[in-house]
Image (cartoon, rainbow, N blue to C red):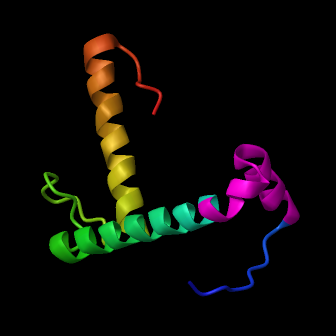
């Protein structure tokens, strides 16, 4: 195992310590980093496999944050449109 020095904000250290206790703090931080790395690897894999297009969403191009935002806005607009037709009001999204 390699020991490294990491500086963390005091409030974050306090929160972690309150959550898991001082004796479990190191393990909690290791687990959090491993979890974050697993999530990033999964995101990278999906992006490589689907090129920014969500599986099952033909035409949903999420390759940039701007395109993802536009897709969400359009999806919400369509939801509101359906809601107005069905219930006479908007979905609130």
Residues in magenta? 10-27
Q: Nearer the viewer, residue 73 or 33?
A: 33
Q: Nearer the viewer, residue 71 or 38?
A: 38
> Which residue appears at 33% of the width and 67% of the height?
43
Location of residue 46 (image quadrant): bottom left
Q: Is residue 16 magenta?
A: yes
> Which residue appears at 36% of the width and 61% of the height?
68
> Which residue appears at 68% of the width and 55% of the height?
24
Residue 90 shows in this picture: yes
In the rendered image, the quadrant that contains the N terminus is bottom right
Residue 64 shows in this picture: no
Q: Is residue 25 left or right of residue 43?
A: right
Residue 21 image offset from top left, x and y in percent: 75, 49
Residue 36 image offset from top left, x and y in percent: 48, 65
Q: Is residue 46 magenta?
A: no
* Residue 3 to residue 12: above or below: below
> Which residue appears at 31% of the width and 44% of the height?
75
Q: Nearer the viewer, residue 64 or 47?
A: 47
Q: Is residue 82 left or right of residue 65?
A: left
Residue 2 image offset from top left, x and y in percent: 60, 87
């Amino acid at each position: 195992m390699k020991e490294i020095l990491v500086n963390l904000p005091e409030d974050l250290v306090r929160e972690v310590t309150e959550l898991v206790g001082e004796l479990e703090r190191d393990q909690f931080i290791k687990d959090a980093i491993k979890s974050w790395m697993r999530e990033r690897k999964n995101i990278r894999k999906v992006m490589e496999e689907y090129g920014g297009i969500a599986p099952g969403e033909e035409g949903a191009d999420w390759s940039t944050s701007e395109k993802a935002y536009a897709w969400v806005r359009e999806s919400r607009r369509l939801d509101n449109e359906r809601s107005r037709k069905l219930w006479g009001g908007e979905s609130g999204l």
